[in-house]
Image (cartoon, helix red, strand yellow):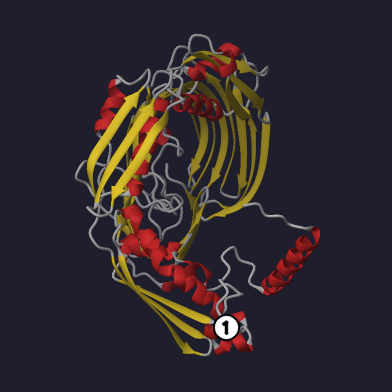
Amino acid sequence: MKITVTKKACAGVLLGMLAWTLPLWAAPSSADQPEPESAGSASPEAKKGTSPASDVKLDIVISGIEGKLLDNARAYLGLEQKKNDPLLSALWIRHLYKKAVEQIQKSLQPFGYYNAKVQASLEQLGENSWLARFQVDPGPRTRVTELDLQWLGEGAADKGLQQALQNFPLKKGDYLDDAVYEKGKSALIALAEETGYPDAQAVKAQVVVDPRNNTARVVLHLDTGKKYYIDSIRLHQDVLNEDFVRRYLVDVKPGDVYSQDNLLEIQHALIEAGYFSLVGIKPRFDETHENRVPVDVRLEPGKRQLYSVGLGFDTDIGVNLSLRWNHRRLNRMGHKADAQLKLSMNNSYVLGNYWIPIRDPRTTKLGFSARLEREVLDDSESNFIDVDAGYYWEKGDWLTRYYTEFKYEKFTLGDQPAQTTHFLSLGATLQRTWRAPDKLPYLRKAWAMFGDIKGAPSGISSTYYLRAHLKARAYLPIFSKGRLVLRGEYGTATVGDFDLYPTSLRFYAGGDNSVRGYDWKTLGPKDAQGNVVGGRQVLTASVEYDHQIAAQWLAAGFVDAGNAYDDALDHVFFGAGFGARWLSPVGTVRLDLAWPFNKENDEQTQFSDLRVHFGFEVLM
């Protein structure tokens, strides 16, 4: 049949189409517009005009399913998506309602329900109020009766890939679940890429469902493609010695399998080095030769020097001013330096460090430091300088430091004359911190420990000593939003002439990181005049409960106990109280109100004995 259309007819058709579409311009601007209804079925609301959108209320009740099925049904349901649309009208509700049954049925298919039955009703409760009800019977669930999984291509015989195929999460006889299938398929492709097959892809992926018998046949054929290896790692930078930079790449070398994991390992190692602001990695497949891919690494240097100024308050040392300087790249061999100045009424110091990366620069380095410090307490005063050299070695979560230290100190205790001492010590430090992953800033499961032992012989020091100091802290989850914080400290020293033993090495208790309720370094052995002179040993413990009351706020209650002593712990001081914690991105800001439970000679505690402790805390 041949149809001829004249110009006059075309004009008539265009005018007709324009006249028909004009009413639709006022319809809601949605991709899902309501279908026109016949004049006989028009409701009174439609004749009078659409009600204002803000007056239309639509309630939706879905019964018979729950959990993921219910969530997915609501996600598929057009009525649910549009019920708060500002242009919702009675006409639009009826239009969306017509599609609702099919939408709910489709929403259940990803979970293996292909014979769902839905009883639906739409009721107008008032002039602008509607209620849609859906009673869902999901019916029998589809089972996988055939499972055809295959690797094709160069890596088809790879044992790791074959093992992963056997561990595919969807088994014969399992209920069909699209999410499980897709997750398993993605995991197989990702594993192939990690194994050196970046071109891996699914060449045949089918899920054939027989709704009448509630059975499904799953076919998944994956082609690995060619296996690739890293040919060379080409560094593009001119700020550091290239051999030094390559010492950060000991975990990934030319000849290793080409994979995203290895590329990320290269990037991570160079970012963690702290020298570069940008690490860009580009595999050059256009230069591939015999399945070996060159990798270009472009490095943009970071700022060499950083400065910071801080003004703070700490209960132990009061108002303090701090200045920091950090030089992250002193020369082409990656040497670093930093310095810090802190000034306060009770404690002031200046500290400088120089760092030399050696061997594997990620885990080993040499450190040289000098510290000049002045400390003024009610019962003592000390001025000292420490110069030390240390070897730092990190393995896993453990950090070890072996060091030698020279200390020169002048100190005064009470009314006694000043003493001047010097010590050349050898020591070792071991520490570890563990945190549950992805729990910052509110750590509910973590622990840390610190141990230091050092000593000096009498021949080259004012007197001999051997000193050990241990600290530990643990966070344990309790209830749904709480944590138990346990803290302990023990220190002991053997000293030849205690009168020559400097205050910076003696043990004290009291303060916001010790027994709260007592001032900083006010607990310990005293001389005949009642001045606290510090002891050979210290033992403290703390139990605290923190409860999360807001995203970054905790309420706390605690009990502390302990003392510093010489030979026997004959008097234990207790403190208790409550406080608040603010979880900042870099640590915890603490505010505590604490009372001493007992004093010397068992004096009664008064309200005026209240101590306010304010400080900053990070897990060691």
Which residue was labeled with disc 1? 39
> Where does residue 431 sit, x and y in percent of width and height?
37, 34
> Where does residue 548 sit, x and y in percent of width and height?
41, 63
In this view, the residue farthest toward the front is: 1
Looking at the image, is 415 positioned above or below residue 231?
below
Looking at the image, is 53 positioned above or below residue 359?
below
Viewer-proximal residue, 526 or 253? 253
Query: Does 281 sit left or right of 510 as displayed?
Result: right
Rate crowding at label 1 as few (under 14), some (14 to 19) or many (20 or more) other CA atoms within 10 Å. Answer: few
> Where does residue 53 sit, x and y in percent of width and height?
60, 80
- Three-letter residue code for mark 1: Ala
- Residue at the (29%, 40%) spot, across then down: 218
Looking at the image, is 411 positioned above or below residue 43?
above
- Residue at the (39%, 44%) spot, across then down: 437
Residue 583 visible within the image: yes
Residue 430 visible within the image: no
Looking at the image, is 407 positioned above or below residue 530?
above
Query: Does 426 sit left or right of 540 as displayed?
Result: right
In this view, the residue farthest toward the top is: 290
Viewer-proximal residue, 6 or 48? 6
Query: Does 367 sit left or right of 329 as displayed?
Result: left
> Where does residue 346 sit, x and y in percent of width and height?
56, 49
Secondary structure under badge 1?
A: helix
Quadrant of the rendering where the C terminus is positioned? top left
- Which quadrant of the structure image shows residue 195? top left
- Which quadrant of the structure image shows residue 319? bottom right
